[in-house]
Amino acid sequence: MELIHLAFYLGLIIFLVIVFAKAIKIATAPVHLRWELYPVAHEKGKAHYGGSYLEEFEWWTKPLQKNLLGEVWTMFQEIVFLKGVWEHNRSLWFGSAPFHYALYLYVVFTILTLLSLIFGLTPTIEGFSNHSIIKFLNVLLWISSIFGIIGAIVLFLKRIFDSNLKLYSNASHYFNILLIGALYVTSFIWLLSSENTIQEIFGFYLGVFSFSQIPSLPIVGYIHFYLLSFFLFYLPFTHMTHFFMKYFTYHKVRWDDEPNLPGSKFRKKLMEQLNFPVQWSAPHIGADGTKTWLIIASSPLPTKEKKNG
Amino acid sequence: MAEKRKIKITDISNPNLQPLVEVAPTNTIELPPPYDKLEDLPGFKKLSEATRQSVDDSLDGVVAIGVPKPKTPEEEQELVEKFISGLIKLFSKENNWTFLQPLVLTMEHCAKCQTCSEECPIFEASGYEEIYRPTYRAEILRRLYFKYVKPGSPLLKKFQVGDIDLNWTLISRLVELAYRCTICRRCAQACPIGIDNGLITHELRKLFSQEMGIAAKEIHDKGTVQHLLVGSSTGMTPEVVKDNVSFIDEDLSERLGIKVESKWDIEGADYLVLHNAGEFLSWPENPAAFAILLDAAGIKWTYSSELLGYDGVNYGVWYDDFQFSRIAMRHFEIAKKLGVKGIIMGECGHESKSMAIIAERIFGNEIKTINTMSLIEHIVFSGKIKFDPERNNFPVTLHDPCNIVRLMGIVQPQRRVLRFLAPKFREMEPHGVENYCCGGGSGFAVMTPYNFLDWRIHISGRKKFKQILDAFKDEPPGPEVPKYVCAPCSNCKGQIRDILDYYGAKEKSGIYYGGLVELVVNAMADLKEPFIDFSMM
């Protein structure tokens, strides 16, 4: 086993474990109070103008209708077209879009590579280089690399020269862009310098996933996979986890309009939360570390506050 | 105007910058004549030296809260420690389960792309003053959260989000900064990731109130505390409110030639009507119009004379979860005791959102809440009342209260009513869920301390004033044609009143404002006299 094996395994395991742990932690967070923001994409027949079921007189007498396709379509536009950035921050879109498209294409490239391996397309088989999938993967990696480099350059320059972004950019922002940019630069150089890049990448994944030796790679290939391993290791600790947290910001906050009807799935959890002990110190709260939310909410104002009031 | 000082995030802790920024009226949002000349307007009121000595104005020279300055270094240190303790509680599930999930999501996943910035009318109206950028206060809280709450290596955390010095200067400025955002959440609407910087304002206010006992006097001492003790944030006791309502009924009955009769504590009524009690004092024609309309529609309704039973406001929603819950719980208890089917919420945005959305999540749906917009639409199109839309034959535009529209999704009922009953109705641009806040949201409309009123007219309210003027641009510009801004929310009406008064817009342009129900009653064919009398507005 080589060092690159270990680096890749470590990166992948940390990525999977931390992403999973973070997702579980946020998914099991307490039920929060409603804080939806319209348009709510699943409002059937109303989402296009931002309407809700609350528009209906005595809405509880009518069935609540959800259009889940509306959610899918909204997320699709957001992910694929970066609609929000296009509409509200056009100049950034020209950097953000290629940057994100490059990532999407790279993910697709990797998934297709792994699927091809699973279905028996290995570098040793005859006619490998001329296989249409390999040609397609080659194009994908070219586009991804070019988009990634363009996106990284534009975003890096924006962070440096755009006063709106500069003030809020920390060392990690520059580092993140450089790291991701370096991934694409290495894949780009690899594509330029070798005629067998895809074959070599197949060899790498075959080696790491079959726990066997990896055929020799050009130096740029090693750099690329060390960078990728580090990126996998590093990503879960950054704000870039928005790639999956977006599910929660949209579905569990912005679009959470579920009424508290008898039998609501969160009712039991809510009752538990109302019995949490409260520690806030301001006198008007009247907390002592043992009184619960419900007791405080159903108690009159503490005496001291009455005198002040 | 003085050239703007370029500030860094960390400058908020720098006590040598006094103030951190200097805010003055700007022309970033240009108004049409005769409101276009900044030099014709008085600037921000200068604070007296005595005031500046006693309260902190070091953020922007404006004072909304008036945080007293600590007298000794020990006192200062104590306050800093209290802040840290509150910060930790803000991120604990026991103390802040109410908003923990969205708060953590916002703290940890903002890409700082500034896609939200342009959506903030306060940032724009201030001439893009950095401290008002939606991400600025969020960035301060984020750095504090990483430094004092989130586990991990300090070096790594500095690398991730940067550093910040926590001292009293920062805290006192952050208190004021938590009252420079109306929580309209336009910024959140624009965020592609789903980050909510409006929520940060809300959570900061909670930290200050729930841990340090610091809040705007108008929304705490004179607001929720007075509400819970006296019965209403207006200070009206049950006896006083009954007297006032009786006077309103008599006055309207005499003027309109019909019997206007409010009902109190009626057993067997279907609905408890809960207005923002400010209506009884400032816009009595609004509850009167409700009484006329509900009676005409044959709805069995009643007011309650129990403490809190006649004031539907809940200022807690802007700054304190516990004050909020106490008031909401009391409202539901009163309704339950009366045995009504539900509560009809008056034309008040934060009341509607508080009861129908936020309290509903805690207390359930046993007591139904009826929002005014859908109720009025239901009545108007029920066929029970005959209308003559020609009675509303004057230009009308609609202000969308953030709480009702962007935050509840109630968009079309009021429009269908206006399209039917107001022949000269036109929209503001943008409108619906993309509306602009009136500038008085999150309690600002009732806040006038020190020079804060100047700020909310010039900065938070300017965009709305421009929208109003633009909506009537095709009408004769003078006062000869009365123009009606329909603002179905008490707080929005308060803010719009202050803006129109400040600019003299009634006298110069004939711009009036009122609710939706007044327009509906004005169009009732059976009324002998018009309900809306511009000469009395």
Image (cartoon, rainbow, N blue to C red):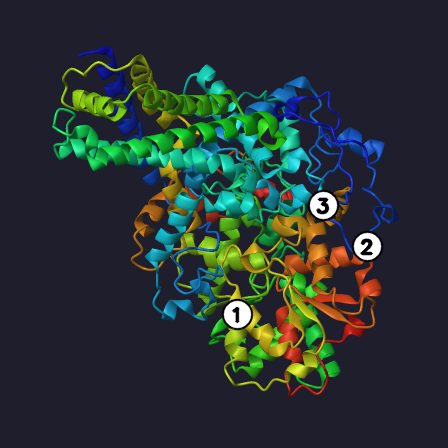
Q: Mark 1: which secondary structure?
A: helix
Q: Quarter-wise, where is residue B452 in the image?
A: top right
Q: Is residue B26 left or right of residue B526?
A: right
Residues marked 1 and 2, same chain: yes
Does A71 sit above or below residue B89?
below
Q: CA distance from mark 2 to mark 3?
A: 15 Å
Q: Is residue B476 left or right of residue A187?
A: right
**Residue A150 got which mark?**
none
Q: Mark 2: which secondary structure?
A: loop
Q: Which residue is mark 1?
A: B413
Q: Name which of mark 1 and mark 2 comes first in the sequence.
A: 2
The amino acid on which the numbered mark 3 sits, given as a three-letter code, is: Ile
Which percent across, then down, holds residue B237? 65, 60
Q: Is residue A217 left or right of residue B95?
A: left
Q: Mark 3: which secondary structure?
A: helix
Q: Which residue is mark 3?
A: B459
Counting other residues with Cα less than 10 Å from the Cα at mark 1, is it few (<14), some (14-19), or many (20 or more)? some
Q: Quarter-wise, where is residue A113 in the image?
A: top left
Q: Which residue is mark 2?
A: B35
Q: Name which of mark 2 and mark 3 comes first in the sequence.
A: 2
Chain at tag 3: B
Chain at tag 2: B
Q: CA distance from mark 1 to mark 2?
A: 33 Å
In-front residue for pair A71/B241: A71
